[in-house]
Amino acid sequence: MNKTKISNIPYGPYIAVIAGATVKGKPSYTTIGAYGVVSQRPVLYVSLKNTHYITQGIRENGFFSVNIPDVGLIEKTDLCGIVSGNSKDKSQVFSAFYDEAGDAPMIEECPVNYLCKVIQTIPVFDFTMFLGEIVAAYAKDQCLENGTPDAARVKPTIMMAARYFDIGEPVGRVFQSGRELAAK
Ligand SMILES: Cc1cc2nc3c(=O)[nH]c(=O)nc-3n(C[C@H](O)[C@H](O)[C@H](O)COP(=O)(O)O)c2cc1C
């Protein structure tokens, strides 16, 4: 086997997203890689360090947003992962918009936004994993293809081992690329 055993560190890849929450009556934003789908019923998770400023807002309000920044927002995306609301106000970094379904700011500049209502809270060492059912979702008109966000237009950012990347070229189709193999 042509492999080297490496450290037990999660190197990625992950999509860099920005979690949003209302904290002390103001919007706040925190960059995360620990986000994903939980079930076919539309539930997302975000995993956040207990000491992060945003974590207390999600706990208090029971809502968070997940905002998918495009690669053009890389500086602001990184900023929200460097600066803590514990020491600096991040409420003006982006323009916030809201949906009546819940109290969490969504980011106007981001092509895709999910508003989530917390349905479960799971402690994981010094982190909290919030599972949130999607109660509203938005996408910029120019990123949609037949009503669905198109990856090439959304231009999400991938992070791996301390670097950011764009998504590159499509390499296959979901539920199709494996069909020939499945038929054998
Ligand atoms: C690309 C990137 C990904 C990050 N992913 C996470 C994450 O998944 N969970 C987490 O708790 N912190 C993560 N962080 C760190 C927080 O974003 C960072 O500590 C931030 O300043 C916390 O802000 P807050 O205290 O205002 O919530 C990440 C940072 C960067 C730059």
Image (spheres, rainbow, N blue to C red):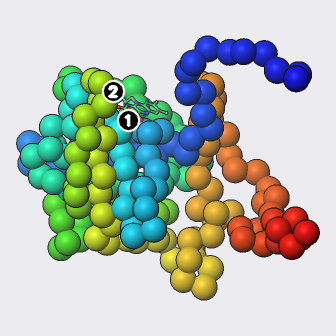
Q: Residues within 10 Å of mark 2 (few under 14, many from 20)?
A: some
From mark 2 to mark 1, how far is it between C-alphas?
Answer: 6 Å
Relative depth, front residue between 158 and 40: 40
- Mark 1 C-beta closer than 8 Å to ligand 1: yes
* Left/right of residue 130 with respect to residue 142 in the rendered view: left
Mark 1 is on which residue type?
Answer: Cys
> Disc 2, ligand 1: is the CB inside 8 Å?
yes
Residue 107 vertical placement versus 83 (above, below):
below
Specify the label residue 80 is tagged with: 1
- Residue 94 visible to an observer of this rendering: no
Disc 2 residue type (three-letter): Val
Q: Residue 69: give x, y in percent of width and height.
A: 49, 51
Q: Residues within 10 Å of mark 1 (few under 14, many from 20)?
A: many
Is label 1 in a helix, a strand or a loop? loop
Question: Residue at 20% across / 72% down in the picture?
Answer: 101
115 to 122, vertically: above or below: below
Mark 2 highlights which residue? Answer: 83
Q: Which image quarter is the C terminus in?
A: bottom right
Q: Residue at x 30, y 24 (%)?
A: 125
Q: Residue 181, position in %: x, y?
A: 87, 65
